[in-house]
Image (cartoon, helix red, strand yellow):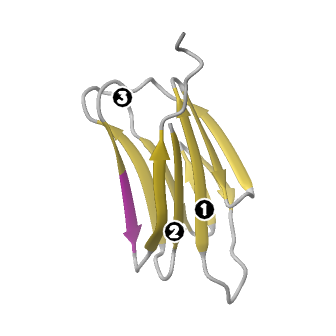
Amino acid sequence: MEIRVDVDLKTCQRFTVAFKAGTNNTPSIVMSYGDSKFKMMGEESPLTFAAGKERLLGLRIFIDHSVVEVFVNDELCGTTLISPAAGDTSLEMNAEGGEAKAKLVEAWPIKTIWEE
């Protein structure tokens, strides 16, 4: 699937996006922004916003059978291997230490290379 999330971080200190499988023991896919760093699955990269401008976090997330690829603000890219999810998966977003506003949340299926 492909997911696009655009968030105005306003005053929040940490913003987290997580994909949680509902029917098996598949680990969650978790990514977050806080302390001027973007973190995903144990890896982190610096990510700063221009002073005096909106703190807009733009995520394009691609999830296929065993890979997650994330593009952050057209500036960072991260890829990680995952266990295939079985059953229902939910998307959870959480702002901590202040306010954030989701400006856009879209998701749509993409054709996997694993299907014939």
Q: Which residue matches tag 1?
A: 58
Return the residue nearer the eye: 69 or 14.
69
Residue 93 in magenta stretch = yes
Amino acid type assigned to the residue bearing label 2 in the image: Val
Q: Residue at x 69, y 75 (%)?
A: 49
Q: Residue at x 44, y 75 (%)?
A: 100
**Contact check, label 2 and label 1, Cβ < 8 Å:** yes
Task: Work out whether mark 3 precedes mark 2 in sequence or the reverse, and give the earlier one.
Answer: 2
Residue 115: percent from left, percent from top: 52, 14
Q: Which residue matches tag 3?
A: 26
- In which quadrant will I find the C terminus? top right
Q: Is residue 60 above or below residue 14?
A: above
Is residue 78 rendered to the left or right of residue 20?
A: right
Q: CA distance from mark 2 to mark 1?
A: 6 Å
Q: Which range of residues does the magenta coloring cover?
A: 92-96
Q: Residue at x 27, y 26 (%)?
A: 24
> Where on the picture, by quarter, is residue 26?
top left
Amino acid type assigned to the residue bearing label 1 in the image: Gly
Q: CA distance from mark 3 to mark 1?
A: 26 Å
